[in-house]
Image (cartoon, rainbow, N blue to C red):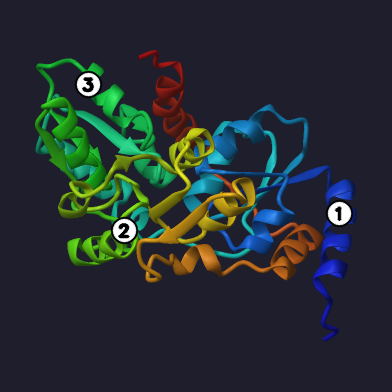
Amino acid sequence: MKQYSNAELLEKLAALKKERNAIILAHNYQLGEIQDAADFCGDSLELSLKAAKSDCSVLLFAGVRFMAETAKILSPDKTVLLPREAGCDMADMADGRALAEFKKLHPGALTVCYVNSTAAVKAECDWCVTSANAVDIVRSLPGDKEIIFVPDRNLGAYCGEQTGRKMILWDGYCPVHQRITPGVIKARKKEFPESELLMHPEAPKSVRDLADRLLSTGGILRYVRESREKSFIIATEIGILHRLRAENPDKVFISATEELVCPWMKVLRLEDLVNSLENMTIQIELPEELRKKAEAPIRRMLEFKK
């Protein structure tokens, strides 16, 4: 099989995008070559919202399955492609049937899911949240209601800390952020004492307490752009460093540890994007009843006003 150069692959990709009336969406944790080839980079919900407003016919989602499902939930009339099968270890720690059974143990509780969850899990929930709005939404919920938070126990615990609400936490977590330890953080801060430590709230409490700021991926990008600081330690998946450096060439970015790599976010190559658009695979399909149920907590979130 002929091996194409990156330039040739990008040329083929441009032609296929035009032919298919497609756009490419790339998550902030993807490889640099994938981010550079995308029409939009961002976090999962941000990308799905941009896609829903576009007049394209095909969404090529360079991410993992739950992200492509969210895009399909919000753009049911568009064809959504996942270039290669890729899961999310945290999202896969919960499933709709298990959550439905768990809810029976807590009748009357409100169920809140992190957007990093499958369509089947979203369909069992009252609210969907992102890492940026989770605290505000949890704070707004009726005080006489128990709150089930799924699937991320770390983000759920953080919401409880910030709001004083008692959280019933699903025992899920992001393996990448779980690798961050106090020893690693203290060593990095000692090595780069003038650098500000920015961390994602998916991290465990033992390291959240050491952060200068806890921010979503979008929040990290915005904060850095507006900050007068020149050096930052970034405690989230290493892929975001590509965009941070591209957008802020005058600033220095250090990963909290080189182990912050999500293997699912690193499977895609330019060849996969080309093959996906050529063959129109892998198409994301959701039963309409499930899609509508999963859309309801997302719409409730989008209508939320602080």
Q: Nearer the viewer, mark 1 or mark 2?
A: 2
Name the N-terminal-most of marks 1 and 3. 1
Instruction: Report which residue position mark 3 lands on.
Output: 139
- Where is residue 2 drawn, in percent x and y? 85, 84
- Element type where label 3 sits in the image: helix
Instruction: Report which residue position mark 2 lands on.
Output: 177
Q: Amino acid at mark 1?
A: Ala
The CA span between labels 1 and 2 is 35 Å
> Which residue is nearer to you in this view: 18 or 41?
41
Residue 74, label in figure: none
- Where is residue 196 drawn, in percent x and y? 35, 47
Name the residue: 44% across, 28% down. 298
> Which residue is nearer to you in this view: 262 or 83?
262
Judge left or right: residue 282 versus residue 207: right
Instruction: Report which residue position mark 1 lands on.
Output: 14
Question: Around disc 3, counting alpha carbons within 10 Å, would you say few (fewer than 14), some (14 to 19), or many (20 or more)?
Answer: some
Name the residue: 28% across, 59% down. 189
> Which residue is nearer to you in this view: 99 or 49?
49
Using the image, determine if residue 15 lies above or below residue 136.
Answer: below
Task: Mark yes or no: residue 181 visible.
Answer: yes
The CA span between labels 3 and 2 is 24 Å
Using the image, determine if residue 105 lies above or below residue 251.
Answer: above
Judge left or right: residue 99 versus residue 218: left
Judge left or right: residue 110 versus residue 81: left
Q: Amino acid at mark 2?
A: His
Name the residue: 48% across, 65% down. 264
| Picture quadrant where residue 155 is located | top left
| Picture quadrant where residue 101 is located | top left
Q: Nearer the viewer, mark 3 or mark 2?
A: 2
- Element type where label 1 sits in the image: helix
Residue farthest to the front? 194
